[in-house]
Image (cartoon, rainbow, N blue to C red):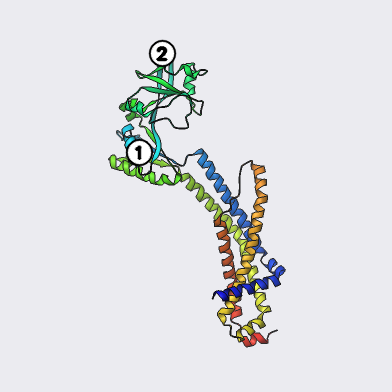
Amino acid sequence: MFKQLRFAFAQALENIRANFFHTFLSILGIVIGVAALVAILSLIDGMEKYAKEQISSTTDLKNIMIRTETHQTINNIRIRKDSFAYLNYAAFSALRENMAEKATGFLFTQQNSGLSLQDKPEPLAAVVTGIAPNLPETEELAIGRKFLEADFNEKNKVAVVNHLLARQIGAHSDPNKLIGKSITFQGQDFNIVGVLKAGKAQAPTLFIPLIFIPETVLAQSPPTCLLEAKAVENVAKIKTETEAWLKQHYPKGKADFEVITNEFRVDQVSKGFLLFRIVMGLIVGISVLVGGIGVMNVLLISVTERTSEIGIRKALGANKKDIMRLFLSESITVSLFGSLLGLTFGVLGTMVFIPIIKAITKVPFQAAYTWNTLLVIMVIAILVGVVFGTYPAMKAARLDPVDAIRRE
Protein backbone atom coordinates (compact mmCIF):
# COMPACT_ATOMS: atom_id res chain seq x y z
CA MET A 1 0.00 0.00 0.00
CA PHE A 2 2.77 2.42 0.97
CA LYS A 3 4.73 1.56 -2.18
CA GLN A 4 1.63 2.23 -4.32
CA LEU A 5 1.08 5.62 -2.68
CA ARG A 6 4.73 6.56 -3.08
CA PHE A 7 4.58 5.60 -6.78
CA ALA A 8 1.35 7.61 -7.25
CA PHE A 9 2.85 10.74 -5.67
CA ALA A 10 6.05 10.31 -7.73
CA GLN A 11 3.93 10.18 -10.89
CA ALA A 12 2.06 13.27 -9.75
CA LEU A 13 5.29 15.19 -9.22
CA GLU A 14 6.51 14.16 -12.67
CA ASN A 15 3.28 15.44 -14.25
CA ILE A 16 3.62 18.77 -12.40
CA ARG A 17 7.23 19.11 -13.59
CA ALA A 18 6.22 18.38 -17.17
CA ASN A 19 3.45 21.01 -17.12
CA PHE A 20 4.82 23.41 -14.49
CA PHE A 21 3.70 26.73 -15.96
CA HIS A 22 0.22 25.45 -16.84
CA THR A 23 -0.16 23.91 -13.37
CA PHE A 24 1.04 27.10 -11.64
CA LEU A 25 -1.46 29.28 -13.53
CA SER A 26 -4.28 26.83 -12.78
CA ILE A 27 -3.59 26.84 -9.03
CA LEU A 28 -2.90 30.57 -8.80
CA GLY A 29 -6.15 30.93 -6.82
CA ILE A 30 -4.84 28.53 -4.17
CA VAL A 31 -1.49 30.36 -4.04
CA ILE A 32 -3.19 33.75 -3.55
CA GLY A 33 -5.78 32.40 -1.13
CA VAL A 34 -3.28 30.56 1.06
CA ALA A 35 -0.85 33.52 1.01
CA ALA A 36 -3.65 35.83 2.16
CA LEU A 37 -4.78 33.31 4.78
CA VAL A 38 -1.25 32.91 6.17
CA ALA A 39 -0.75 36.68 6.30
CA ILE A 40 -4.11 37.26 7.99
CA LEU A 41 -3.74 34.44 10.54
CA SER A 42 -0.18 35.42 11.47
CA LEU A 43 -1.16 39.09 11.79
CA ILE A 44 -4.22 38.21 13.90
CA ASP A 45 -2.09 35.92 16.10
CA GLY A 46 0.36 38.79 16.52
CA MET A 47 -2.47 41.18 17.40
CA GLU A 48 -3.86 38.70 19.96
CA LYS A 49 -0.42 38.24 21.51
CA TYR A 50 0.07 42.02 21.71
CA ALA A 51 -3.40 42.51 23.24
CA LYS A 52 -2.75 39.86 25.91
CA GLU A 53 0.61 41.44 26.74
CA GLN A 54 -1.10 44.81 27.16
CA ILE A 55 -3.77 43.28 29.41
CA SER A 56 -1.08 41.51 31.46
CA SER A 57 0.88 44.75 31.88
CA THR A 58 -2.16 46.80 32.97
CA THR A 59 -4.07 44.09 34.84
CA ASP A 60 -2.37 41.42 36.89
CA LEU A 61 -3.93 38.18 35.68
CA LYS A 62 -2.55 36.33 38.70
CA ASN A 63 -4.74 38.28 41.14
CA ILE A 64 -7.79 36.85 42.94
CA MET A 65 -9.95 39.36 44.80
CA ILE A 66 -12.28 38.42 47.66
CA ARG A 67 -14.83 41.14 48.31
CA THR A 68 -17.68 41.26 50.82
CA GLU A 69 -21.12 41.72 49.29
CA THR A 70 -22.58 44.48 51.48
CA HIS A 71 -25.67 44.97 49.32
CA GLN A 72 -28.39 42.81 47.84
CA THR A 73 -30.82 43.37 45.00
CA ILE A 74 -34.55 43.06 45.70
CA ASN A 75 -37.08 43.90 42.98
CA ASN A 76 -34.27 45.48 40.95
CA ILE A 77 -33.44 47.81 43.85
CA ARG A 78 -30.02 47.60 45.48
CA ILE A 79 -30.16 47.89 49.28
CA ARG A 80 -27.59 47.43 52.04
CA LYS A 81 -27.78 44.19 54.01
CA ASP A 82 -28.54 44.26 57.73
CA SER A 83 -25.62 41.92 58.37
CA PHE A 84 -22.90 40.20 56.39
CA ALA A 85 -19.74 38.22 56.96
CA TYR A 86 -16.27 39.65 56.37
CA LEU A 87 -12.66 38.53 56.59
CA ASN A 88 -10.47 39.68 59.46
CA TYR A 89 -6.75 39.03 59.94
CA ALA A 90 -7.30 35.67 61.70
CA ALA A 91 -9.61 34.40 58.94
CA PHE A 92 -7.22 35.62 56.24
CA SER A 93 -4.31 33.75 57.86
CA ALA A 94 -6.41 30.57 58.16
CA LEU A 95 -7.45 30.82 54.51
CA ARG A 96 -3.85 31.08 53.30
CA GLU A 97 -2.69 28.20 55.51
CA ASN A 98 -5.37 25.86 54.13
CA MET A 99 -4.52 26.48 50.47
CA ALA A 100 -2.96 23.62 48.54
CA GLU A 101 -1.74 26.15 45.97
CA LYS A 102 0.18 28.74 47.96
CA ALA A 103 -0.43 32.39 47.18
CA THR A 104 0.85 35.69 48.45
CA GLY A 105 -1.48 38.56 49.18
CA PHE A 106 -2.85 41.03 51.65
CA LEU A 107 -6.06 42.13 53.37
CA PHE A 108 -6.90 45.82 53.55
CA THR A 109 -9.57 48.37 54.35
CA GLN A 110 -9.57 52.12 53.92
CA GLN A 111 -11.26 55.10 55.52
CA ASN A 112 -10.79 58.85 55.46
CA SER A 113 -9.83 60.19 58.87
CA GLY A 114 -8.28 63.08 60.71
CA LEU A 115 -4.79 62.68 62.19
CA SER A 116 -2.57 64.58 64.54
CA LEU A 117 1.21 64.71 64.88
CA GLN A 118 3.52 65.67 67.73
CA ASP A 119 4.76 69.24 67.53
CA LYS A 120 2.33 70.07 64.70
CA PRO A 121 -0.82 71.88 65.83
CA GLU A 122 -2.37 72.06 62.32
CA PRO A 123 -4.96 69.33 61.67
CA LEU A 124 -4.07 66.56 59.20
CA ALA A 125 -6.28 64.34 57.09
CA ALA A 126 -5.40 61.18 55.18
CA VAL A 127 -6.67 57.91 53.82
CA VAL A 128 -5.98 55.46 56.64
CA THR A 129 -5.32 51.97 55.28
CA GLY A 130 -5.40 49.04 57.66
CA ILE A 131 -3.42 46.29 56.00
CA ALA A 132 -2.08 42.81 56.76
CA PRO A 133 0.36 41.15 56.73
CA ASN A 134 2.37 43.78 54.81
CA LEU A 135 2.28 46.45 52.12
CA PRO A 136 2.38 45.23 48.50
CA GLU A 137 5.79 44.93 46.85
CA THR A 138 4.87 47.70 44.41
CA GLU A 139 5.08 50.20 47.30
CA GLU A 140 8.78 51.09 47.50
CA LEU A 141 10.43 52.58 50.56
CA ALA A 142 12.28 55.87 50.53
CA ILE A 143 13.54 55.17 54.03
CA GLY A 144 12.79 52.90 56.98
CA ARG A 145 10.94 49.59 56.82
CA LYS A 146 7.56 48.04 56.21
CA PHE A 147 5.68 45.83 58.67
CA LEU A 148 7.13 42.70 60.24
CA GLU A 149 5.41 39.54 61.47
CA ALA A 150 6.53 40.53 64.97
CA ASP A 151 4.47 43.74 64.69
CA PHE A 152 1.32 41.61 64.48
CA ASN A 153 2.38 39.03 67.05
CA GLU A 154 3.50 41.64 69.60
CA LYS A 155 0.83 44.17 68.56
CA ASN A 156 3.36 46.92 67.87
CA LYS A 157 1.67 50.18 66.96
CA VAL A 158 3.72 51.07 63.91
CA ALA A 159 2.87 53.04 60.77
CA VAL A 160 4.14 53.77 57.27
CA VAL A 161 3.34 57.04 55.46
CA ASN A 162 3.38 57.78 51.73
CA HIS A 163 5.18 60.71 50.14
CA LEU A 164 2.03 62.86 49.97
CA LEU A 165 1.39 62.60 53.70
CA ALA A 166 5.08 63.28 54.31
CA ARG A 167 4.71 66.43 52.18
CA GLN A 168 1.59 67.46 54.11
CA ILE A 169 3.51 67.07 57.34
CA GLY A 170 6.33 69.14 55.86
CA ALA A 171 9.04 66.46 55.89
CA HIS A 172 9.11 65.58 52.18
CA SER A 173 12.57 67.12 51.71
CA ASP A 174 14.03 65.00 54.52
CA PRO A 175 12.00 61.82 55.26
CA ASN A 176 14.45 60.94 58.05
CA LYS A 177 12.75 63.53 60.21
CA LEU A 178 9.58 61.40 60.32
CA ILE A 179 11.15 58.12 61.43
CA GLY A 180 10.40 57.53 65.10
CA LYS A 181 7.75 60.26 65.32
CA SER A 182 4.32 59.48 66.73
CA ILE A 183 1.16 60.05 64.72
CA THR A 184 -2.29 59.79 66.30
CA PHE A 185 -5.30 58.09 64.74
CA GLN A 186 -8.59 57.75 66.66
CA GLY A 187 -6.83 58.18 69.99
CA GLN A 188 -4.11 55.63 69.25
CA ASP A 189 -0.47 56.66 68.84
CA PHE A 190 1.49 54.95 66.07
CA ASN A 191 5.24 55.06 65.67
CA ILE A 192 6.29 55.93 62.07
CA VAL A 193 8.80 53.31 60.87
CA GLY A 194 8.82 53.93 57.11
CA VAL A 195 8.24 56.50 54.38
CA LEU A 196 7.34 55.45 50.84
CA LYS A 197 8.78 56.76 47.59
CA ALA A 198 6.66 58.85 45.26
CA GLY A 199 4.20 56.62 43.41
CA LYS A 200 0.78 56.60 41.79
CA ALA A 201 -1.08 57.49 45.00
CA GLN A 202 -3.30 60.56 44.63
CA ALA A 203 -4.04 61.14 48.32
CA PRO A 204 -2.02 61.30 51.57
CA THR A 205 -2.08 57.80 53.04
CA LEU A 206 -1.25 56.32 56.40
CA PHE A 207 -0.70 52.53 56.60
CA ILE A 208 -1.21 50.73 59.90
CA PRO A 209 -1.55 47.02 60.81
CA LEU A 210 -5.11 45.83 60.21
CA ILE A 211 -5.37 44.45 63.74
CA PHE A 212 -5.68 48.02 65.08
CA ILE A 213 -8.82 48.74 63.07
CA PRO A 214 -11.75 48.13 65.46
CA GLU A 215 -14.20 45.34 64.60
CA THR A 216 -17.01 47.88 64.60
CA VAL A 217 -15.25 49.74 61.79
CA LEU A 218 -14.56 46.50 59.88
CA ALA A 219 -18.25 45.61 60.11
CA GLN A 220 -19.13 48.91 58.44
CA SER A 221 -16.26 48.92 55.94
CA PRO A 222 -15.36 45.24 55.30
CA PRO A 223 -11.76 44.53 54.25
CA THR A 224 -10.94 43.43 50.71
CA CYS A 225 -8.60 40.48 50.22
CA LEU A 226 -6.19 40.37 47.28
CA LEU A 227 -4.38 37.09 46.60
CA GLU A 228 -1.68 36.60 43.98
CA ALA A 229 -0.98 33.17 42.48
CA LYS A 230 2.54 32.15 41.55
CA ALA A 231 1.42 31.44 37.98
CA VAL A 232 -1.64 32.31 35.88
CA GLU A 233 -2.33 28.57 35.49
CA ASN A 234 -2.99 28.34 39.26
CA VAL A 235 -5.63 31.08 39.38
CA ALA A 236 -8.62 28.84 38.60
CA LYS A 237 -7.59 26.29 41.25
CA ILE A 238 -7.03 28.94 43.92
CA LYS A 239 -10.39 30.50 43.11
CA THR A 240 -12.10 27.12 43.52
CA GLU A 241 -10.28 26.45 46.82
CA THR A 242 -11.18 29.91 48.11
CA GLU A 243 -14.87 29.53 47.29
CA ALA A 244 -14.93 26.10 48.96
CA TRP A 245 -13.23 27.47 52.10
CA LEU A 246 -15.64 30.41 52.35
CA LYS A 247 -18.62 28.10 51.93
CA GLN A 248 -17.29 25.82 54.67
CA HIS A 249 -16.50 28.56 57.22
CA TYR A 250 -19.35 30.99 56.61
CA PRO A 251 -23.05 29.99 56.52
CA LYS A 252 -23.78 32.47 53.73
CA GLY A 253 -20.34 32.26 52.14
CA LYS A 254 -21.54 32.41 48.55
CA ALA A 255 -24.03 35.19 49.26
CA ASP A 256 -21.71 37.30 51.43
CA PHE A 257 -18.53 37.04 49.35
CA GLU A 258 -17.62 37.58 45.72
CA VAL A 259 -14.45 35.98 44.37
CA ILE A 260 -13.21 37.87 41.31
CA THR A 261 -10.46 37.11 38.81
CA ASN A 262 -9.33 38.83 35.60
CA GLU A 263 -9.39 35.68 33.46
CA PHE A 264 -12.55 36.85 31.71
CA ARG A 265 -10.60 39.67 30.06
CA VAL A 266 -8.26 37.24 28.33
CA ASP A 267 -11.28 35.08 27.37
CA GLN A 268 -13.02 38.13 25.89
CA VAL A 269 -9.95 39.01 23.83
CA SER A 270 -9.51 35.41 22.66
CA LYS A 271 -13.19 35.13 21.64
CA GLY A 272 -13.05 38.45 19.79
CA PHE A 273 -9.97 37.46 17.81
CA LEU A 274 -11.41 33.99 17.15
CA LEU A 275 -14.50 35.61 15.62
CA PHE A 276 -12.32 37.94 13.56
CA ARG A 277 -10.15 35.00 12.48
CA ILE A 278 -13.18 32.98 11.34
CA VAL A 279 -14.78 35.88 9.42
CA MET A 280 -11.56 36.81 7.64
CA GLY A 281 -10.83 33.14 6.97
CA LEU A 282 -14.21 32.70 5.28
CA ILE A 283 -13.67 35.78 3.13
CA VAL A 284 -10.20 34.65 2.06
CA GLY A 285 -11.57 31.13 1.58
CA ILE A 286 -13.24 32.34 -1.62
CA SER A 287 -9.79 32.53 -3.24
CA VAL A 288 -9.03 29.02 -2.04
CA LEU A 289 -12.33 27.85 -3.57
CA VAL A 290 -11.34 29.42 -6.88
CA GLY A 291 -8.00 27.64 -6.59
CA GLY A 292 -9.77 24.34 -6.00
CA ILE A 293 -11.73 24.81 -9.22
CA GLY A 294 -8.39 25.41 -10.91
CA VAL A 295 -7.12 22.08 -9.58
CA MET A 296 -10.22 20.33 -10.90
CA ASN A 297 -9.63 21.98 -14.27
CA VAL A 298 -6.02 20.74 -14.37
CA LEU A 299 -7.08 17.19 -13.57
CA LEU A 300 -9.95 17.12 -16.06
CA ILE A 301 -7.54 18.23 -18.78
CA SER A 302 -5.10 15.61 -17.56
CA VAL A 303 -7.78 12.90 -17.79
CA THR A 304 -8.55 13.94 -21.36
CA GLU A 305 -4.88 14.06 -22.37
CA ARG A 306 -4.06 10.73 -20.71
CA THR A 307 -7.10 8.71 -21.80
CA SER A 308 -4.97 6.24 -23.75
CA GLU A 309 -2.58 5.88 -20.83
CA ILE A 310 -5.50 5.12 -18.49
CA GLY A 311 -6.79 2.50 -20.95
CA ILE A 312 -3.37 0.81 -21.14
CA ARG A 313 -3.05 0.82 -17.33
CA LYS A 314 -6.49 -0.82 -16.98
CA ALA A 315 -5.66 -3.33 -19.71
CA LEU A 316 -2.48 -4.28 -17.80
CA GLY A 317 -4.45 -4.98 -14.62
CA ALA A 318 -4.98 -1.61 -12.91
CA ASN A 319 -8.39 -1.47 -11.24
CA LYS A 320 -10.64 1.49 -10.42
CA LYS A 321 -8.97 2.02 -7.03
CA ASP A 322 -5.52 2.26 -8.64
CA ILE A 323 -6.71 4.92 -11.12
CA MET A 324 -8.57 6.79 -8.36
CA ARG A 325 -5.46 6.70 -6.19
CA LEU A 326 -3.29 8.00 -9.04
CA PHE A 327 -5.46 11.06 -9.76
CA LEU A 328 -6.27 11.82 -6.10
CA SER A 329 -2.54 11.71 -5.35
CA GLU A 330 -1.95 14.14 -8.18
CA SER A 331 -4.75 16.40 -6.91
CA ILE A 332 -3.38 16.43 -3.36
CA THR A 333 0.16 17.01 -4.64
CA VAL A 334 -0.96 19.95 -6.77
CA SER A 335 -2.87 21.41 -3.78
CA LEU A 336 0.12 20.95 -1.47
CA PHE A 337 2.37 22.54 -4.07
CA GLY A 338 0.07 25.56 -4.33
CA SER A 339 -0.30 25.76 -0.54
CA LEU A 340 3.47 25.68 0.05
CA LEU A 341 3.93 28.46 -2.51
CA GLY A 342 1.14 30.41 -0.83
CA LEU A 343 2.71 29.81 2.60
CA THR A 344 6.03 31.17 1.34
CA PHE A 345 4.47 34.24 -0.25
CA GLY A 346 2.31 34.82 2.84
CA VAL A 347 5.31 34.84 5.20
CA LEU A 348 7.27 37.12 2.86
CA GLY A 349 4.22 39.39 2.63
CA THR A 350 3.96 39.80 6.42
CA MET A 351 7.66 40.65 6.55
CA VAL A 352 6.87 43.54 4.21
CA PHE A 353 3.69 44.59 6.05
CA ILE A 354 5.09 44.66 9.61
CA PRO A 355 7.54 47.58 9.12
CA ILE A 356 4.74 49.56 7.42
CA ILE A 357 2.34 48.86 10.32
CA LYS A 358 5.02 49.83 12.86
CA ALA A 359 5.80 53.05 11.00
CA ILE A 360 2.12 54.08 10.89
CA THR A 361 0.97 52.98 14.37
CA LYS A 362 4.24 53.37 16.33
CA VAL A 363 3.31 50.12 18.09
CA PRO A 364 5.89 47.36 18.81
CA PHE A 365 3.83 44.80 16.90
CA GLN A 366 5.07 41.51 15.44
CA ALA A 367 3.39 38.80 13.39
CA ALA A 368 3.15 35.45 15.17
CA TYR A 369 3.76 32.26 13.22
CA THR A 370 2.24 29.29 15.00
CA TRP A 371 1.94 25.57 14.36
CA ASN A 372 -1.83 26.09 14.22
CA THR A 373 -1.43 28.22 11.10
CA LEU A 374 0.73 25.56 9.45
CA LEU A 375 -1.77 22.86 10.42
CA VAL A 376 -4.67 24.89 8.93
CA ILE A 377 -2.77 25.25 5.65
CA MET A 378 -2.02 21.51 5.50
CA VAL A 379 -5.66 20.60 6.19
CA ILE A 380 -6.87 23.06 3.52
CA ALA A 381 -4.43 21.62 0.98
CA ILE A 382 -5.56 18.04 1.61
CA LEU A 383 -9.27 18.95 1.64
CA VAL A 384 -8.99 20.92 -1.60
CA GLY A 385 -7.07 18.03 -3.17
CA VAL A 386 -9.62 15.43 -2.10
CA VAL A 387 -12.80 17.47 -2.74
CA PHE A 388 -11.83 18.87 -6.12
CA GLY A 389 -9.88 15.83 -7.22
CA THR A 390 -12.59 13.26 -6.55
CA TYR A 391 -14.71 13.96 -9.64
CA PRO A 392 -11.82 13.86 -12.15
CA ALA A 393 -10.46 10.72 -10.44
CA MET A 394 -13.87 9.03 -10.64
CA LYS A 395 -14.22 10.04 -14.28
CA ALA A 396 -10.84 8.50 -15.07
CA ALA A 397 -11.61 5.34 -13.09
CA ARG A 398 -14.91 4.79 -14.95
CA LEU A 399 -13.32 4.85 -18.42
CA ASP A 400 -13.74 1.62 -20.39
CA PRO A 401 -10.21 0.30 -21.15
CA VAL A 402 -11.05 -0.64 -24.78
CA ASP A 403 -12.66 2.72 -25.57
CA ALA A 404 -9.86 4.55 -23.76
CA ILE A 405 -7.14 2.83 -25.79
CA ARG A 406 -8.94 3.62 -29.07
CA ARG A 407 -9.01 7.40 -28.28
CA GLU A 408 -6.21 9.58 -29.48
Q: Nearer the viewer, residue 80 or 60?
A: 60
Q: Is the residue marked by circle 2 packed among few (<14), some (14-19), or many (20+) residues within 10 Å?
A: few
Q: Give the amino acid at mark 2.
A: Gln
Residue type at mark 1: give it: Arg
Q: Height in image: 202 above or below 174?
A: below
Q: Earlier in the sequence, mark 1 or mark 2?
A: 1
Task: Pick whichever, 56 or 147, lies toward us.
Answer: 147
Local secondary structure at mark 1: helix
What residue would you read off at disc 1?
A: 96
How many tags in the picture? 2
Q: Is residue 148 above or below residue 11?
A: above
Q: Disc 2 marks which residue? A: 118
Q: Secondary structure at mark 2?
A: loop
Residue at (53%, 43%) from the top-left corner? 53
Residue 279's disc is none
Q: Nearer the viewer, residue 95 or 267?
A: 95
Indicate the position of residue 345 as horizontal and vertical percent values: 66, 57
Q: Residue at x 56, y 51 (%)?
A: 45
Quarter of the rendering occupied by the N terminus: bottom right
Drawn side of residue 35 relative to residue 197, left or right: right
